[in-house]
């Protein structure tokens, strides 16, 4: 799910497409948890922990992609759009207070 630097910029569509992957990862994790509750042993515990870690990794990767999109890519797209829409004015989106949160 992670992208290398050469593959940027990602799109919002790519982030949305990751959501079913995270949902499926959670379902597998939840199922493993239920199996471990019903029949606790070392095998069900190992499966539960592995699927928990996979789920956390998927959530972390999706959040990192969303963060990259909202904090880097989207402001760049807005700035480029402003330069095309308002070529005579010096619009700098990064200096706007709404983007400095």
Image (cartoon, grey):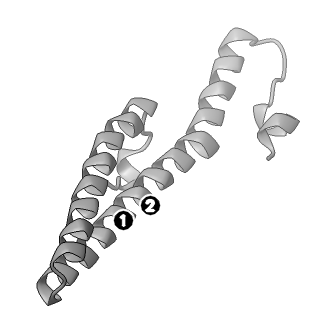
Q: Toward the viewer: 65 or 48?
A: 48
Check the image and name the residue furthest to the left: 43
Do residues under tags 2 and 1 come within 8 Å of each other at their CB atoms? yes
Left or right side of 80 for 43: left
Q: Quadrant of residue 13?
A: top left
Q: Which mark is residue 60?
A: 2
Q: Which mark is residue 57?
A: 1
Question: Which SS class for mark 2?
Answer: helix
Percent across and percent down for residue 77 are 59, 28
Q: Quadrant of residue 26?
A: bottom left
CA separation in Å, label 2 and label 1:
5 Å
Question: Which SS class for mark 1?
Answer: helix
Percent across and percent down for residue 97 are 87, 37
Left or right side of 41 for 94: right
Q: Residue at x 76, y 11 (%)?
A: 86
Q: Residue at x 35, y 56 (%)?
A: 4
Q: Toward the viewer: 78 or 42?
A: 42
Percent across and percent down for residue 52 are 31, 70
* Label 2: how many Cα within 10 Å (few below 14, some 14–19, many 20+): some
């Amino acid at each position: 799910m992670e992208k290398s630097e050469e593959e940027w910029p990602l799109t919002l569509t790519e982030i949305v497409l990751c959501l079913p992957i995270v949902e499926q990862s959670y379902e597998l994790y939840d199922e493993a948890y239920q199996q471990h509750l019903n029949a606790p042993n070392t095998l069900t515990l190992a499966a539960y922990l592995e699927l928990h870690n996979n789920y956390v990794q998927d959530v972390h990767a999706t959040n990192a992609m969303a963060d990259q999109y909202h904090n880097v890519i989207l402001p760049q797209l807005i700035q480029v759009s402003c330069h095309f829409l308002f070529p005579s004015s010096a619009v700098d989106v990064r200096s706007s207070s709404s983007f400095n949160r």
